[in-house]
Image (tube, rainbow, N blue to C red):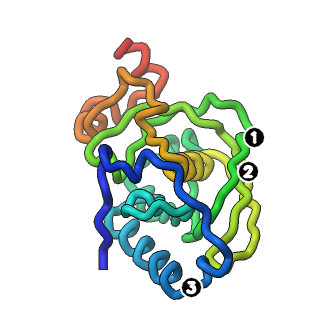
């Protein structure tokens, strides 16, 4: 069963989500929600989905960057993004620390801002302390595209959308980004769009 993904304008996307207790995490309700979120994320398809995106104001997100999502990118593009497959996992009540320079610029999209993309500057490395789906403490150290995914999903848990962080003049439809800018570097795009 696929859950409905809410779109920009829904109040839940602009609220700081509430933390979950260990008992809540282990409850059948939250365990079922995690499975439904995984199915919804894969069906969309996306590399992450935060609970506020399905209308639930909870500090919970699912993440997975499958190898088959990389097919349209060249080896050079994958290397430039630092993009590698990331197995499915859950982050709950995450605390994010930016550990690298905030200089990593690439196009970013969002299932809750359907059909659009823009260049967003993110930290190239992060540390996330959180709980997993078994309510166990986990520390994640991530770089490249995985670090970007974590920052994007944790922003959702704090009521922030990528449009709040984007380079405004690079805001495009996904179709036009593919059509006109697919093989152009973010730096070149910014210089050409002003």
Q: Residues within 10 Å of mark 3 (few under 14, many from 20)?
A: few
**Is 87 situated above or below 101?**
below
Q: Are marks 2 and 1 in contact (CB under 8 Å)?
A: yes
Question: Where is the C terminus found, in terms of image quarters?
Answer: top left
| Residue appearing at x 38%, y 23% in the figure | 168
Q: Is residue 84 visible?
A: yes
Q: Please state if 145 lies on the left or on the right of 47 as rendered.
A: right
The quadrant in which residue 140 appears is bottom right
Q: Secondary structure at mark 2?
A: strand
Q: Is residue 63 visible?
A: no
**Residue 99 tag number:** 1
Q: Nearer the viewer, residue 83 or 133?
A: 133
Q: Quadrant of residue 191?
A: top left
| Label 1 CA crowd tier, 10 Å (few <14, some 14–19, many 20+) | some
- Callout 1: SS: loop
Mark 2: give few (<14), some (14-19) or many (20+) Cα within 10 Å: many
Upstream in the sequence, badge 1 or badge 3? 3
Q: Residue at x 33, y 69 (%)?
A: 43
Q: Is residue 92 left or right of 194 when viewed as pictured?
A: right
CA gap, disc 1 to disc 3? 34 Å
Left or right of 140, for residue 31:
left
- Quarter of the picture containing the N terminus is bottom left
Q: Distance from label 2 to label 1 (Cα)?
A: 7 Å
Q: Looking at the image, tell me whether mark 2 or mark 1 is earlier in sequence order.
A: 1
Instruction: State left or right for residue 16 relative to residue 114.
Output: right
Query: Which disc, if any, is residue 127?
Result: 2
- Give the residue at mark 3: 27
């Amino acid at each position: 069963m696929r859950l409905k993904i809410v779109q920009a304008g829904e109040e839940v996307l602009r609220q700081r989500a509430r933390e979950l207790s260990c008992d809540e995490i282990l409850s059948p309700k939250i365990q079922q929600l995690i499975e439904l979120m995984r199915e919804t994320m894969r069906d969309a398809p996306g590399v992450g989905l935060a609970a506020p995106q399905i209308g639930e104001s909870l500090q919970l997100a699912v993440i997975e960057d499958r190898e088959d999502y990389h097919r349209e990118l060249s080896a050079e593009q994958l290397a430039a993004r630092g993009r590698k497959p990331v197995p499915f996992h859950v982050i709950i009540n995450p605390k994010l620390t930016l550990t690298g320079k905030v200089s990593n610029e690439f196009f970013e999209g969002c299932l809750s801002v359907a059909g659009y993309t823009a260049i967003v500057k993110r930290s190239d490395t992060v540390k996330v302390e959180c709980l997993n789906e078994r309510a166990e403490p986990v520390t994640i150290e991530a770089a490249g595209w995985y670090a970007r995914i974590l920052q994007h999903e944790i922003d959702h848990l704090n009521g922030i959308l990528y449009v709040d962080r984007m380079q405004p003049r690079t805001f495009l439809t996904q179709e036009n980004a593919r059509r006109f800018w697919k093989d152009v570097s973010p730096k070149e795009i910014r210089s050409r769009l002003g």
